[in-house]
Image: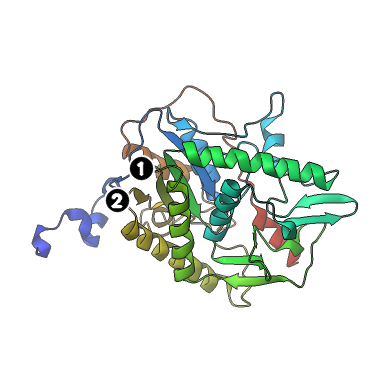
Amino acid sequence: MSYSQLPPHSFWGRCLADNAFLLDRLYPAAVRLQAGTRVATAGSCFAQKIGSRLRQTNVGFLDLEPLPPGMRIETGARYGYGLYSARYGNLYTSAQLLQLAEDAFAARLRDEAIWTAGGRWYDGLRPRIEPGGFDSREILEAARLSHLRKVRTLLEETEVFIFTLGLTERWQHGGTGTVFPLWPGALKPAIVDENHVFVNARITAVVDELDRFIRLVRAHNPDFRVLFTVSPVPLIATATGGHVLAATVRSKAVLRTAVDEILHLHEGCDYFPSYEIATANPRCRLAFRDDEREVRDEVVDRIMALFLAAHPGLGRSAAAAPGAGIDPVCDEWLLNAAGS
C-alpha cells in the first residue's frame, strides 16, 4: 500500500478543505445498532448526554430503575433516576465498572462502603442516590441488594453496552481496594478515613479492568457487545498536586490508549470518537460552555448526529426523552466546594 492509495480522509489537508472536515467518515461503526437493539448506558457525566439523545430514537433503551410514577423529572435526576440504565450514579472509572459487575453477579455487600453519620446510613458506592441517607443499615442493605439484582439483569439482557470513561484518578479503601465514586471527604456529611487512599491508574490497570469486566459479563451473556467513548470533559480537580491541565491530558490519553488495547483484545467492541470531535476538531474551536468544561448542547447534537448517521437502522422516536434538556448530575462538582 502507498499513500496514493489512501482515501481523502487520511490526509489532514484534504479534510481541512472540506467544510465539515470529512467527519462523516470518522466513525465506521463496527458495533451496529438497529431499531429495538437493547442498549444500556453507564459512565461519567457525559454519558448522560449520550443516553438522553438515544432515548429519543427507536433503539431498545433499557432502564431497569425508571422514574417512579408521579415524580418530577428534575426531582428524579437528583435521586439518580433517568440518568443511566440503572441507579448506579456516575461510574467514572474502569475500576468502578468492574466492581459493580462483580458485586451484581455475586450479590455482594461491601462493609467498608456502608457509612453512618448523624444517625443516618449512607451507601458509599452511590452516596448521592439517597443524599439524605437511609433510616437504618437494614434498609440500606435491602436497597443495595435490590439495585444489584437490577444491574445483573441489565448486564444479562443488554445487547450493546455504551460506557463512557472519564477518569483515571480514583479514591479507594486501602485494605480492600473498594473504589468510591469520588473523594469521600467531599460529601456532606464528609467521610474522612485514613484507610481511604488516592490511586492514579496506569494504562495496564485500565486495560486489565476492562478486560475482566468483558470476560465476566460474557460468561453470563455471550453476545454482549461494548461501545466505548471517552468523555471530553476536563478534570474539575486533580489530587496529584500537579496542574489540572497536565492531569487532564494524562488521564484522557491513558483512557483512550486503554480502549484501543481492548479493541485488539476483544471482538464485538467498538469506539466512538466523541472525545476527538469535541477537543480536536478544527471546525469546532468553541465546543465548550463558558466554564470551558461542559460541552455545548449544539456540539453534543452534532456529535450524536454523526453517531446516528453511522447507524442507519435507527430512527427518531416520537416519545419525549426523560431528562432531555437537564444538565448532567456530576459527583465531581463537589470537589469545587472541597477545594474552596
Badge 1 vs badge 2, beta-carbon distance below 8 Å: yes
Tally of numbered tags: 2
- What is the x, y in percent for residue 228? 42, 51
Q: Which residue is mark 2?
A: 26
Image position of 73 (left or right of 9): right
Question: Considering only vertical position in the picture, is 327 above or below 16?
Answer: above
Image position of 192 (left or right of 90): right
- Here the colouring is rainbow
Residue 228 seen in the current view:
yes
* Front residue of 109 and 179: 109
Residue at horizontal 51%, vertical 54%?
Answer: 288
- What is the x, y in percent for residue 59? 43, 31
Q: Which residue is mark 1?
A: 306
Q: Residues within 10 Å of mark 2 (few under 14, many from 20)?
A: some
Image position of 339 (left or right of 204): right
Tell which residue pokes out farthest to the bottom in this image: 242
- Quadrant position of residue 5: bottom left
Residue type, mark 2 in image: Leu
Point out the image quarter for the C terminus.
bottom right
Question: Considering only vertical position in the picture, is 34 above or below 226?
Answer: above
Residue at horizontal 65%, vertical 41%?
Answer: 147
CA separation in Å, label 1 and label 2: 9 Å
Residue at horizontal 36%, vertical 61%?
Answer: 260
Residue type, mark 1 in image: Leu
Residue 80 seen in the current view:
no
